[in-house]
Image (cartoon, helix red, strand yellow):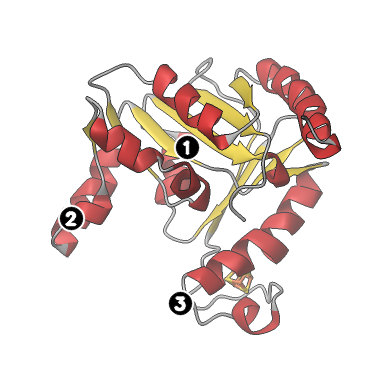
């Protein structure tokens, strides 16, 4: 049976999908992560080249393994054996057919807000891969751009910095110290207002709490 939270997520999801449409972003709502995995595989034609940015959401879906098992040309930098191979895969990912990632925050009016350290993920979001599929739990939804930036600075980034064992102020205090540390995972913040190429960016909203 659908819980009040699920019902709330579904109602919000409907509204956000309408907002994405106005921004040339194709969007889907899936009630569970299992449905979301199926939706991803339906969106990607066989034999496409596929890569992804670091994401706890994608990990929770086990989508990387599912892609490896099917007929896709998977560019997986975790399988690289040397730093040179990793570097090459970072570059190759920027011209793949489908790039998967999550979003640090999504506003109710359909904007995506993302902050990166290396910048490979936001680079792919902006330009390069023919298609970008964003998978995000409804816990990432916030009211507006300001709330999205607050979410990134004071929730997503500190938790990711802790996960990655970074030596930054946020891993000591739990809140952003606006650092310029070598370990900072906040070098680039990108706000995506629209997709200039219609439907190049696709968003799958998931009616669950996923990632940070
Ligand atoms: S303290 Fe540094 S790494 Fe942590 S959230 Fe702030 S800018 Fe990002």
Give the class, few, some or many, for how many residues have Cα within 10 Å of label 3's Cα (few <14, many ≥20): few
Q: Is the CB atom of the residue marked by disc 3 within 8 angstroms of ligand 1's nearest atom?
A: no
Q: Secondary structure at mark 3?
A: loop
Q: Residue at point 43% right, 43% down? A: 123
Q: Residue at point 47% right, 31% down? A: 37
Q: Secondary structure at mark 2?
A: loop
Mark positioned earlier in the residue sequence (1 or 2): 2
Give the distance between the C-alpha atoms of the residues marked 3 and 1, in whole angstroms. Answer: 24 Å
Q: Residue at point 49% right, 47% down? A: 60
Q: Quadrant of ligand 1?
A: bottom right
Q: Is residue 69 visible?
A: yes
Q: Which mark is residue 182?
A: 3
Q: Which residue is mark 1?
A: 125
For marks 2 and 3, give the one nearer the viewer: 2
Q: Which residue is mark 2?
A: 80
Q: Residue at point 22% right, 24% down? A: 71
Q: Secondary structure at mark 1?
A: helix
Which quarter of the image is occupied by the C terminus?
A: bottom right
Place of residue 52 in the rendered image (x, y in percent of width and height, measured from the top left) = 38, 42
Q: Is residue 95 visible?
A: no
Give the distance between the C-alpha atoms of the residues marked 2 and 3, in whole angstroms. Answer: 24 Å
Query: In the rendered view, does 130 fall on the left or right side of 82?
Result: right
58 or 188, nearer to the observer: 58
């Amino acid at each position: 049976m659908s819980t009040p939270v699920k019902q709330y997520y579904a109602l919000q999801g409907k509204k956000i999908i309408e907002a994405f449409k106005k921004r040339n972003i194709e969007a889907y709502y899936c009630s569970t992560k299992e449905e979301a995995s199926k939706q991803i595989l339906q969106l990607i034609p066989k034999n496409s080249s596929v890569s992804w940015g670091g994401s706890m959401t994608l990990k929770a879906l086990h989508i990387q393994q599912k892609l490896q098992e099917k007929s896709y040309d998977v560019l997986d930098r975790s399988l690289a054996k040397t730093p040179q191979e990793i570097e090459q895969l970072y570059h190759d990912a920027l011209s793949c057919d489908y790039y998967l990632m999550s979003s640090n925050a999504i506003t109710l009016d359909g904007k995506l807000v993302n902050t990166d350290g290396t910048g490979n993920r936001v680079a792919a979001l902006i330009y390069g891969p023919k298609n970008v599929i964003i998978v995000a739990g409804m816990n990432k939804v916030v009211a507006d751009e300001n709330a999205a930036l607050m979410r990134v600075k004071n929730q997503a980034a500190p938790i990711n910095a802790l996960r990655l064992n970074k030596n930054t102020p946020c891993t000591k205090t739990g809140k952003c110290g606006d650092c310029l540390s070598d370990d900072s995972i906040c070098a680039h913040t990108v706000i995506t207002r629209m997709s200039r190429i219609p439907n190049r960016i696709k968003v799958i909203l998931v009616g669950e709490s996923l990632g940070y």
